[in-house]
Amino acid sequence: MQKVFVAADNIVSPLGNTTLQNYEQVLLGNSGISLHDNAAYAAAPFYAAMLAPGQLASYTGSNNLNDYTKFERLLIASVSAALPQTDIPLQSNRTGLIVSTTKGNIELLEQGEAAGSAAPVAHMQLGYSARRVAAFFGITNEPVVVSSACISGLVAILTAKRLISAGVYDHVIVTGADVLTRFVLSGFQSFQAVSAAPCRPFDAARNGVTLGEGAATVILTTSEALSKDFVLGTGAVSNDANHISGPSRTGEELAAAMKLALEGSGISPEKLGFVSAHGTATLYNDEMEAKALHHAGLANIPVNSLKGYYGHTLGAAGLIEAIVSMKALKEGVILPTKNYETSGVSMPVKISNAIASTQARHFLKTVSGFGGCNAAMVFSLIS
Amino acid sequence: MSNSAYITGTCIIRENKIFLNDKLVWEGEGPGLQELLRAAYDHFSGQYPKFHKMDPLSKLGWLAAEVLLKDSPVLQLPKEAVGMVLSNRSASLDTDFRYYATVKDIASPALFVYTLPNIVMGEICIRHGFKGENTFFVSEQFDAALLTTYAAQLLAETPLQACLVAWVEVLEHRYEVAMALVERSGTQPLTAAALNFLYNKKI
């Protein structure tokens, strides 16, 4: 099968606007999460990982992006930072753009309400934003948008790999972003799913998600000459077929995706340095993941969740977490799960809570989301 | 890649009519989408109370799958061997607007959960127990090439033996569904031209 390599990557988040800055902040144990008291988002103070005022503008620098929404500027900032790391043709029918997001320009709904005049519906269409971002970079191919809830970021990488395998593209820019909005915050609050303190994945005291915002990009290529450190393994998607807003009771469906990813990649569990889990810190999600890790034979493999550093960045989460994990594995590091102290899941799993070292060449990234969807994918250092 | 994906059934819902494999199987008396959904549900199912909690996007996709898969051998396949690739233009905006209208007062969790376009896939999976691959694409126009390529790739490299491939779009009073059942064997090859023909068919 056609090998697909990672040629470049970037993260734009409260922790920085390069992969290295982000990794260094995570390694120091710093988090983008802080307490916010802003009536535009919620009546009461809330914890979230949000870009500081002016932070995104400082990232986009000399580019005049006044005509773009915050969502589009996040994508542009991230892709702009990734492109100079490699050399792929943008105006080529062999180069694709895949955008991952859950809510795109939904901020316009709120801004329209505040301004007393509704934004055009067309500007809230995800395809509209994707086309604008493609045009900004002169990408000639029709962009593809993946919107599969919280698994979108990882599924976007998997989609790129499959479209390359199918012979559609030689190079794909995969980028994803979501903006923290009143829309999303109020929704998670309506579910009683937002933690009153910074989220604590897999911990006994966990009581919900902390939301975040950000963008991330990976540039994928078939060209070994352009490859940096990683080659994509197999990925898989499954559905719980159980409940639209609650995870599987058994974790068997996420486990099935994990097993397909490992078997397809020819990797036995002990070859994994770690599993980068979804770990949202809701009671039910983390419990389901612990069961899935067991079913997939991964109970003894170190597991981390990066939500304590970034919050849940929705459509960007799979991308951000895969990129930080790639950097960590390259450095031989297993990152700790910030805010985790005591196991709060019924199956014993090996939650990483201190920096550890690994010689392993592979890690597994997993995500799960509303609609009962799960995805898992292996990332391997090029030998 | 060898062509091992075939269209084995189709369902279109548009302009108050439902077509199964090109045959008109239901015509609503109108006037709107809600009336069509309710009447067609009563006719084709009537046995699934969860339907009434769904948003219009989920109802539309669910209904098309219901019509297309009735008595289908696909229902006997291993649950991991059935998946779907769905797409539309407006994601979940139709419900997003309705949800956001509740935020000023008491935000509605029952609406919020439908503010993601992939929920329709979750509803179809719950109905039939399908546990295979599922992905939702959003595009400004019906992208037959993407749907064809991606579905064929799924049948070629994953355990999927059957895949629902569909455009399920709703925004306020405008709606349309074009759904194809795709399998590894059959007589009509899955091609972009075939999907475009299905989508553009005059009814």
Image: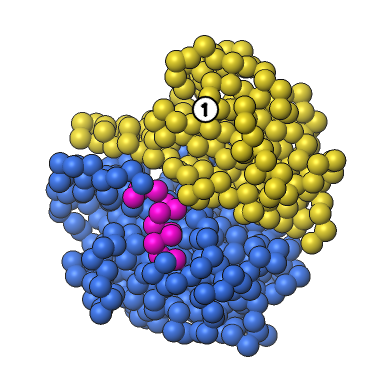
Closest to the observer, A216 or A49: A216
The residue that label 1 is drawn on is: B59
Amino acid, disc 1 = Lys
Residue B160 appearing in the image: no
Report the span colored magenta: A123-134
Q: Quadrant of the N terminus of chain B?
A: bottom right
Residue at image location 23% in from the left, 42% down from the top: A118
Instruction: Spot the residue most to the bottom.
Output: A225
| Among the 4 quarters of the image, the one containing residue A63 | bottom left
Closest to the observer, A364 or B174: B174
**Position above or below: A348 against B35:** below
| Among the 4 quarters of the image, the one containing residue A235 | bottom right
Q: Chain A appears what colour?
A: blue
Left/right placement of residue A170 relative to residue A285 reads: right
Residue at image location 84% in from the left, 41% down from the top: B186
Left/right placement of residue A195 relative to residue A39 reads: right
Q: Please tell me whether the stretch drawn in magenta is mainly helix, strand or loop.
A: helix
**Position above or below: B80 against A327:** above
Residue B101 locus on image (x, y percent) = 26, 33
Helix, strand or loop at disc 1?
helix
Q: Is residue A239 magenta?
A: no
Closest to the observer, A93 or A286: A93
* Chain rendered yellow: B
Q: Is residue A126 magenta?
A: yes
Q: Provide the chain ID for the residue under circle 1.
A: B
Q: Quadrant of the C terminus of chain B?
A: top right
Residue A148 locus on image (x, y percent) = 51, 49
Residue density around tag 1, few if under 14, some if 14–19, many if 20 or more, within 10 Å: many
Closest to the observer, B93 or A236: B93
Residue B51 locus on image (x, y percent) = 52, 23
Residue at image location 74% in from the left, 33% down from the top: B9
Residue A224 appearing in the image: yes
